[in-house]
């Protein structure tokens, strides 16, 4: 979940406090928020970045925090495309002004089509510009591993740059990057190839996808099955199955949101593309989460808002699912006390 607390892309004290909650919570792995591979690929001025070697030391403080408590860590590599250069969500999320306190920057996209009619028109990328961004994903991957991350996730969802190339609602090109599905997914595959080229086989690569645009004329489930198959063939190990974002709110489609509403998307991609999937989207109840994995709908479960509301969700899940010694999900400093039964305060007087 983006925190919008970075300064020039750098990790700060807020991030350390934020991630400390989860490092102690018994997670199997944690994924750092969408982190831009270029300065102009940030959503807001407060977004984290990995476009400069100077960012590595701050990011390493996060990976070391997780590693100290036995939690794997990944990072979501992103380029916001035409959804960049905006104010933070609680400041209205509107496009920045050129002469504002935090000045606007020119955004880029597959075509000169704004994310919303009233927003600034982005610059349509030429092939050299596309190649430069692919290279930025490659170098960002190298920096990720130098910072100590165990894996990376390519952000190809929610209307950001990679997704906007895939969706015919945003991509109106007539060259080899536009038109047919094969052409529209070319950029995503180039990024996946670049990331895999510098990743050893023991480092999994995740790809976050908006599996459907949920808008007429947009990306369909059938399109995403073709994409997921091609990604698997290029070394992507897990498809993180989200939806929407090409129109409307940044990360939401028009699907009615209810608990587990995107799990069927993960199930379809897993079954028809032959790739492992991660289910996400209002996964709140431990039993539902367990069932999604046990029934073969997904291989992994991702928690966002629910984990922010309850950073001890894993412990609660272990208790609810009847795991023996559920306190063992915690580090021993917590497990010792939670496994010792009720405390008789009279013994402390």
Image (cartoon, rainbow, N blue to C red):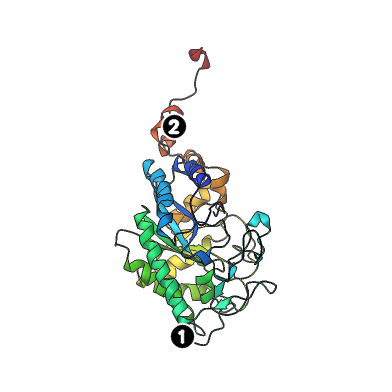
Question: Which residue does the image show at 48% across and 53% down from the upper left?
Answer: 10
Q: Position of residue 286 (x, y in %)?
A: 51, 47
* Element at label 1: loop
Q: CA distance from mark 1 to mark 2?
A: 56 Å
In the rendered image of this protein, does residue 296 appear above or below residue 28? below
Question: What is the tally of numbered marks visible in this picture?
Answer: 2
Judge whether 159 appears above or below 333 on screen. Answer: below
Could you tell me residue 217's position as x and y percent?
A: 60, 79
The answer to which image quadrant residue 113 occupies is bottom right
Which residue in the protein does label 2 denote? 334
Q: Position of residue 257 (x, y in %)?
A: 63, 59
Residue sitting nearer the eye, 44 or 262: 44
Q: Nearer the viewer, residue 37 or 319?
A: 37
Q: Is residue 168 visible?
A: yes
Number of the label disc, if any, that sits on residue 176: 1
Q: Is residue 229 visible?
A: no
User: Residue drawn 66% across and 62% down?
Assistant: 100
Question: Mark 1: few, some, or many residues within 10 Å (few <14, many ≥20)?
Answer: few
User: What residue lies at 48% left-to-right and 38% top-to-bottom?
Assistant: 319
- Quarter of the image containing the N terminus? bottom right
Along the line of sight, the residue nearer the viewer: 58 or 83: 58
């Amino acid at each position: 979940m983006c925190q919008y607390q970075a300064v020039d892309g750098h990790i700060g004290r807020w991030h350390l406090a934020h991630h400390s909650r989860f490092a102690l919570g018994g997670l199997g792995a944690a994924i750092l928020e969408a982190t831009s591979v270029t300065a102009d690929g940030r959503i807001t001025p407060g977004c984290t970045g990995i476009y400069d070697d100077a960012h590595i030391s701050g990011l390493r403080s996060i990976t070391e925090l997780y590693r100290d408590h036995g939690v794997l860590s990944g990072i979501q590599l992103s380029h916001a495309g035409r959804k960049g250069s905006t104010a933070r969500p609680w400041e209205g999320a509107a496009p920045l002004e050129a002469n504002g306190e935090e000045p606007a920057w020119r955004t880029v996209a597959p075509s000169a089509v704004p994310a919303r009619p009233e927003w600034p028109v982005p610059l349509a990328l030429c092939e050299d510009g596309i190649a430069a961004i692919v290279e930025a994903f490659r170098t960002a991957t190298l920096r990720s591993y130098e910072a100590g991350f165990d894996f990376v996730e390519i952000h190809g969802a929610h209307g950001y740059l990679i997704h906007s190339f895939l969706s015919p609602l945003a991509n109106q090109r007539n060259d080899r990057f536009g038109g047919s599905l094969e052409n529209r997914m070319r950029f995503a595959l180039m990024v996946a190839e670049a990331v895999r080229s510098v990743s050893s086989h023991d480092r999994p690569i995740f790809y976050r996808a908006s599996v459907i645009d949920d808008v007429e004329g947009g990306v369909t489930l059938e399109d995403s099955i073709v994409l997921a198959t091609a990604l698997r063939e290029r070394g992507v190990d897990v498809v993180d199955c989200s939806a929407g974002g090409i129109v409307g709110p940044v990360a939401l489609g028009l699907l009615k949101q209810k608990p587990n509403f995107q799990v069927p998307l993960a199930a379809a991609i897993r079954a028809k593309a032959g790739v492992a999937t991660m289910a996400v989207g209002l996964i709140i109840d431990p039993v539902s989460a367990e069932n999604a994995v046990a029934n073969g709908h997904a291989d992994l479960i991702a928690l966002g808002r629910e984990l922010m509301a309850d950073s001890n969700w894993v412990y609660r899940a272990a208790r609810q699912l009847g795991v023996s010694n559920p306190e063992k999900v915690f580090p021993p400093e917590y497990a010792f006390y939670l496994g010792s039964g009720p405390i008789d305060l009279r013994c402390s007087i």
